[in-house]
Amino acid sequence: MKILEANAGALTNYEVVDFLRSKGAAIDSTRVLAQVSPSEYKVYDYLVQTAACNQTREHINEFVDKCKIYGLAKAEVLNIINIRPTSIIDIYT
């Protein structure tokens, strides 16, 4: 494997989950056969309980495009993507 860019920027939680799934974290229920370290399993277990497990690359790209009109920084958009609500929000007045 060749490293093309050493620091391409921050990753969304979805990208981390996708990477861990590609390494076999979701497939190996015994957690012995896959090439995933115990710490990576802990990260995977945490992230599948968040909104990241239901996101898709298309939804993220669409959201980023719609946020451009607000002039948000990349870090702000990344935070919104990573900590988005998982249920409908009720507003009480």
Image: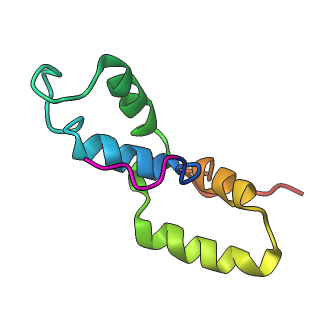
Residue drawn at x 61%, y 71% is: 64
71 in the magenta segment: no
Q: Give the range drawn in magenta.
A: 1-6
- Residue 47, located in which quarter of the rendered image? top left
Residue extending farthest right: 93
- Residue 65, located in which quarter of the rendered image? bottom right
Please name the colour scheme applied to the rendered image. Answer: rainbow
**Drawn side of residue 18 relative to residue 66, left or right:** left
**Drawn side of residue 64 relative to residue 21, left or right:** right
**Drawn side of residue 60 relative to residue 88, left or right:** left
43, above or below 84, in the image? above
The front one of 7 and 18 is: 7
What's the magenta bit mostly, secondary-structure-wise?
loop
Camera sees residue 58: yes
The front one of 78 and 84 is: 78
Residue drawn at x 81%, y 75% is: 70
Camera sees residue 90: no
93, above or below 24, in the image? below
Residue extending farthest left: 33
Q: Where is residue 73 in the image (x, y as percent from the top left)?
A: 77, 62
Q: Position of residue 19 (x, y in %)?
A: 33, 46
| Badge count | 0
47, above or below 36, in the image? below
Q: Where is residue 67 in the image (x, y as percent from the top left)?
A: 70, 74
Q: Position of residue 63 (x, y in %)?
A: 59, 72
Residue drawn at x 53%, y 51% is: 12
- The C terminus - image quarter: bottom right
Residue drawn at x 58%, y 52% is: 9
